[in-house]
Each structure stands twice: as C-alpha cells, then as structure tokens.
Amino acid sequence: MKRFRFTTVIALASLMLFTAGLAGCRNKAEADRDAYERIQNALLTMTGYAAEATVTYISNKSQHTYQVRQQARMSGEYRIEVTGPERVAGNITVSDNKTITQFNTRVQGRFSVLPDEAPERLELFVTSFVKNYLRSQEVTISVASVGESLCTVLEATIPGEHPYLRTEKLWVSNTTHKPVKLSIYDPDGVERVTVTFESFEFNVDFDDSVFRMQ
C-alpha cells in the first residue's frame, strides 16, 4: 500500500512537471512569436533610421574596425560618417540614391561613383537588409542571445554575384525590437562584415540635405 501511494505521488509529480514543462514551452513559443510579430511590424513600417555602430571588416589575414554614424531612408538614400579611429574620423559617404559621393579627410578630396559600382556600402544598412529579406525566396528565423539580450535572428539572401556578399543575418532585440547586430557572409558562409549597433532610432525625419555632400 505504501509502495502504491509512493508510486502514485511520483507519477502525479511527474505529470505536474511534464504539464508545467508543456505550459512553459507554450509560453516561450508564444512569447517568441509575439516578439517576432512586433519586430516584423517595426521593420516593415520603418521609413528610415539613425544609429551609432561599430563596423568590422574581416579578411583572410586581418580585420579592421571602425566606429560610424549611420543615417538611412528606406527609399535608398544614406549617409555614413566615420567617427573612429582618429586617423580616419571625418570620412563621409553619402548617397542620394543616384550617386555615391565620398569625402576623405586625409586627402581633403571627394569622388563619386554610381550605386551599382559599390554595392558593399549599401549592404551595411538595415534598410538594405529589409529589402533583401522581403525579396528572399527562403528566409530563416531563429532565436539567440547576444550578450544579455534575447534576440530574434532573421536571415536573408543578398542578390547578385558579389564574391564577398551572399547572405546576411540581423539580430533584433526581443525586448526593444531594435536591431542589435548585422552580419554579412560570403558564398562559403564565412563572416566578412559585422555591424554592431550601440544605438538605434526608428523613423527619423531627415532633411534632404543630410544625403548631399555639402
């Protein structure tokens, strides 16, 4: 009789733990789904953004890191200003969606190219990621941690045949619904560029002059 009650207690306890586990899984799944829906809405309704970020370029032999200020519109205009390290601070690249113009403080000069001649610059922006994400035939969605932040991770394919730009991932905080990190990979799946966002502001109302070289 004692054995029966003991077994029954264990069985009931196991059932309660199993039920609680299922409830926990359901709650987590619902929370993840709710976060994704909010993140998707924030990205799809984005008209532009301003951000402070760290950009790291990774080659087979070395890597170079820069602090930058980004400003971009979904319509294609963008501005990126290098704020560090000191030797390159003040370099500015702007695009009015027709021409890309770059100012270099070292030579105190500027030059311009067409957007198709420098696609790697555009891919540094979340606005470009969103467009690629919407065009991708297959997209991947997962959940991962970045530091102390739980993030929804979106993956997209970059169009074209660029040798170093094939796929990209965007980590977005499940709490703030703001981008945390953007990584770009080559055709072999090797990470080539990372953009880590220190601050991010959605839907900034930019004046057109922001995207013209003064």
Image (spheres, grey):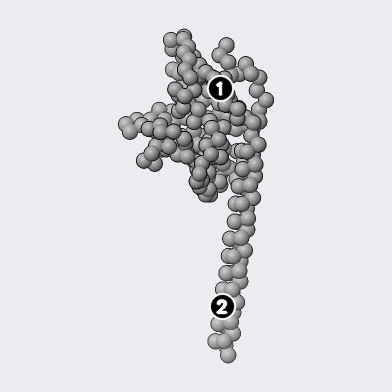
Residue 122 in view (yes/no):
yes
Q: Is residue 206 or residue 146 the one in the foreground?
A: 206
Location of the N terminus (image quadrant)? bottom right
Q: Earlier in the sequence, mark 2 or mark 1?
A: 2
Residue bearing the label numbered 1: 97
Location of the C terminus (image quadrant)? top right
**Quarter of the image where one finds residue 26:** bottom right
Q: Residue furthest bottom?
A: 1
Q: Position of residue 165 (x, y in %)?
A: 42, 34
Q: Residue furthest right?
A: 205
Residue drawn at (51%, 25%), measured in percent from left and top? 68
The amino acid beneath tag 1 is: Asn
Q: Position of residue 205 (x, y in %)?
A: 67, 25
Disc 1 secondary structure class: loop
The amino acid beneath tag 2 is: Ile
What is the CA distance from the residue labelled 2 to the residue labelled 1? 67 Å
Residue drawn at (46%, 13%), measured in percent from left and top? 111
Q: Please report contact status of discs 2 and 1: CB closer than 8 Å, yes or no.
A: no
Q: Is residue 148 or residue 96 the one in the foreground?
A: 96
Disc 2 secondary structure class: helix
Q: Residue furthest top?
A: 108
Residue 184, labelled with which disc?
none
Q: Position of residue 20 (x, y in %)?
A: 61, 66
Q: From the viewer's perspective, is residue 15 above or below residue 209?
A: below
Residue drawn at (39%, 41%), measured in percent from left and top? 189
Please give left or right for residue 106 compared with residue 125 in the image: left
Q: Is residue 177 or residue 46 the one in the foreground?
A: 46
Crowd around label 1: few <14 · some 14–19 · many ≥20 (10 Å): some
Residue bearing the label numbered 2: 10
